[in-house]
């Protein structure tokens, strides 16, 4: 009797297995077709990029894609690339070749953080570079991150700490920290460094840290 039950069950099991395999094959085929529909285009030095090592990306309000590399700044308009590099004989040009980060202020100017050259300002409307008299205090530093806050303050994450620019004054908020990443909420600025995660109040600059806990 038990043998008869197993015999009746086998056809059902075989049908179920065939349906399952068919569904898997259809899913695999559709996924493969979806992946093949993506078109990937590569840009490198042969395409006009100033260097293949890309260290920063930003799309501005005009739609241009700005590409920071270890050797210069590049602007992509959807078809071609335009490069900007540092030249010692151009005092109002890019302040250093290694571009670490790029962002844009409310006036439409790009604020560009560099390695060893501090901050460069770029006006996309007239294609000119300029300086921020306060940010020039960061001239010899490596600027990794730039963050704008609603109170018109600008925060700079650097190789040796965190700086706030507000009301014409540049103040160092964190010292001895290599700032790697920054983000914000309505009440806290989050700063990621080599020594953990730091939360800072932009109002009173009160700081708390979530540092790595060593096991004893």
Image: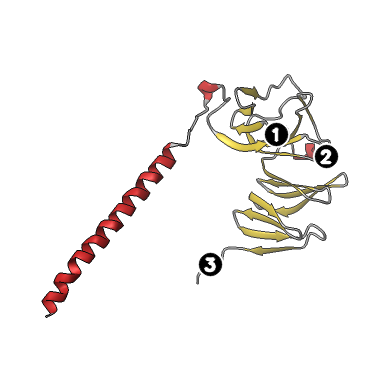
Q: Is residue 44 left or right of residue 199?
A: left
The reply to whether discs 3 and 2 touch (Cβ–Cβ < 8 Å) is no
Residue assigned mark 2: 134
Residue assigned mark 3: 214
Nearer the N terminus, badge 1 or badge 3? 1
User: Is 7 in front, or is 24?
Assistant: 7
Q: Quadrant of the N terminus?
A: bottom left
Q: Which residue does the image show at 64% across and 32% down from the upper left?
A: 65
Q: Measured from the top left, where is residue 144 in percent x and y?
A: 65, 43
User: Is residue 61 at least partly visible in the picture?
Assistant: yes
Q: Which residue does the image show at 65% across and 53% down from the upper left?
A: 177
C-alpha gap between disc 1 and disc 3: 36 Å
Q: Measured from the top left, where is residue 50 in percent x and y?
A: 58, 25
Q: Measured from the top left, where is residue 76 in percent x and y?
A: 63, 27
C-alpha gap between disc 3 and disc 2: 39 Å
Residue with the most extreme right position: 167
User: Is 198 in front, or is 49?
Assistant: 49
User: Is 202 in front, or is 8?
Assistant: 8
Q: Which residue does the image show at 78% across and 35% down from the upper left?
A: 108
The reply to whether discs 1 and 3 touch (Cβ–Cβ < 8 Å) is no
Q: Residue 117 bears which disc, if any?
A: 1
The secondary element bearing badge 1 is classed as: loop
Q: Is residue 169 left or right of residue 213?
A: right
User: Is residue 114 at least partly visible in the picture?
Assistant: no
C-alpha gap between disc 2 and disc 1: 14 Å
Q: Which one is in front in this view, the residue at disc 3 or the one at disc 2?
A: 2
Position of residue 205 relative to residue 1, above or below, is: above
Q: Give the quarter of the image for residue 195.
A: bottom right
The reply to whether discs 2 and 1 touch (Cβ–Cβ < 8 Å) is no
The secondary element bearing badge 3 is classed as: loop
């Amino acid at each position: 009797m038990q043998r008869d039950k197993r015999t009746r069950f086998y056809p059902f099991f075989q049908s179920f297995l065939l349906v399952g395999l068919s569904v898997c094959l259809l899913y695999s085929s559709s996924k493969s077709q979806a992946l093949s529909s993506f078109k990937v285009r590569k840009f490198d030095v042969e395409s006009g990029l100033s260097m293949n090592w890309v260290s920063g990306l930003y799309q501005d309000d005009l739609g241009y894609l700005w590409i920071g590399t270890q050797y210069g700044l590049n602007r992509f308009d959807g078809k071609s690339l335009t490069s900007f590099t540092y030249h010692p004989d151009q005092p109002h040009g890019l302040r250093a070749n290694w571009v670490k980060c790029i962002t844009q202020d409310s006036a439409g100017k790009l604020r560009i953080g560099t390695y060893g050259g501090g901050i460069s300002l770029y006006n996309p409307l007239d294609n000119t570079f300029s300086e921020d008299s306060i940010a020039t205090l960061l001239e010899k530093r490596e600027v990794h991150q730039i963050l704008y806050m609603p109170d018109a303050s600008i925060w700079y994450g650097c190789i040796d700490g965190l700086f706030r620019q507000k009301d014409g004054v540049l103040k160092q908020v964190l010292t001895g920290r290599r700032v790697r990443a920054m983000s914000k909420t309505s009440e806290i600025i989050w700063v990621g460094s080599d020594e953990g995660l730091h939360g800072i109040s932009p109002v009173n600059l009160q700081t708390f840290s979530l540092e790595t806990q060593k096991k004893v």
